[in-house]
Amino acid sequence: MNDQIIFEDVSKFYGEVLGVNRVSLTIPPGITTLVGPNGSGKTTLMNLLTGLVQPSSGSISVMGLSSRDANKFFATVGYCTQFDFFPRGITGWQFLLDSLMLHGMSKLAAIQLAEESLQRVQLDKTAAWRKIDGYSKGMRQKIRLAQAIAHRPRVLVLDEPLNGLDPMARAESMALFEELGRQGIHLIISSHILDEVDRISDRVVLITGGYLIAEGNIHQVRQEVREKPMQVLVRCDRPEALASKMFAMNHCVEARLHPDGRGIFLRTGDVDQFYSILNDIATEGTVKIEAVAPADDDAHAIYQYLIGSEGGTL
Ligand SMILES: Nc1ncnc2c1ncn2[C@@H]1O[C@H](COP(=O)(O)OP(=O)(O)OP(=O)(O)O)[C@@H](O)[C@H]1O
């Protein structure tokens, strides 16, 4: 069975306004995070993927289905949009049952699936029986997530699911995403919380101004920008001495002392040469080197490299 999501040369224009332009992308199962500043086209990509909007040109195939095949799409995809809106006065339980019955389930099947999804998002049943109007932000997120996964979709799309959650609710959500990713579904998340992105994602898709600028495993993406200066943290006993040696050999373009004084961040344009010289210095023994690690092998740094800015609200 086809288990890929494939965008082929997809563009979406809203009248004159560009949503996304000429995106070609293949998404295998696992967790994929869309990263980009406000207005970069993440929601447009998600709306295209879930069949909510149709491409102006190009084609999209989700597990072998065309986005024009609305009924099958509806069954295959779960979508949690960024809109925190519920019918007034509805309970969490009723919200789940109604949406399952919209999928054509019998009441009995809907009850079973609703119970299962409540367990998966760890929302207890007494809370589900209460009106959503009285829920906390975290509980509202949970019930929306429960609704999106209740019909057991193979593709789950979550627009900014961590937005506004307190640290506890965020950690719980992340654990759930990891669990869903392990179960082999396609989980596509957009997030501004970049320090968390690389921890849970199998791959990232970087998008700006409607253009896809890089995609892949976060380390592969880092590789793509390898020619750009890279920052390395060297833990050692004499950071200043190390920096002056590195500058003297022309393999360092910037140095910044670690706040605790027991290490230095060095930026280099030639990582291989840099490591080779560092080895020589370690062997010499004039500086005692304790640890060396890339200091910016994360999405935020990569993003800055790629688009040369902080990227709006990132
Ligand atoms: N329905 C619409 N009508 C007109 N323009 C739209 C519409 N939806 C999105 N756009 C425009 O398309 C571009 C991409 O927007 P999109 O919402 O996809 O970005 P985003 O990355 O999800 O942003 P955000 O993080 O703010 O939600 C923006 O210029 C936006 O103004």
Image (tube, rainbow, N blue to C red):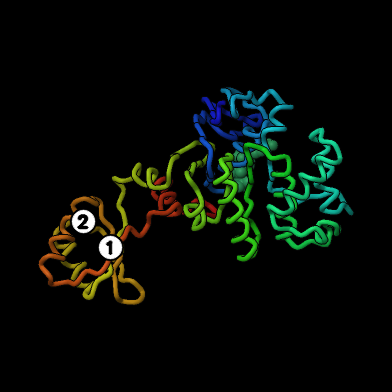
Q: Is residue 149 left or right of residue 106?
A: left
Identify the residue under disc 1. 292
Q: Is residue 246 left or right of residue 111?
A: left
Question: Are the residues tagged 2 and 1 within 8 Å (C-beta)?
Answer: yes
Q: Is residue 28 left or right of residue 278?
A: right
Query: Residue 155, located in which quarter of the rendered image?
Result: top right
Q: For the point 56% across and 41% down, which residue is it?
A: 184
* Distance Cα–Cα, label 2 vs label 1: 9 Å
**Foreground residue, 246 or 276?**
276
Disc 2 CB within 8 Å of nearest ligand 1 atom: no
Disc 1 CB within 8 Å of nearest ligand 1 atom: no
Q: Position of residue 213 (x, y in %)?
A: 45, 39
Residue 10 seen in the figure: yes
Q: Position of residue 140 (x, y in %)?
A: 75, 56
Q: Position of residue 176 (x, y in %)?
A: 61, 53
Q: For the point 29% across and 75% down, which residue is it?
A: 262
* Quarter of the displayed picture in which ligand 1 can be seen: top right
- Residue type at mark 2 is Tyr
- Residue type at mark 1 is Val
Mark 1 nearby-residue class (10 Å; few <14, some 14–19, many ≥20)? some
Q: Position of residue 162 (x, y in %)?
A: 62, 55
Circle number at residue 275? 2
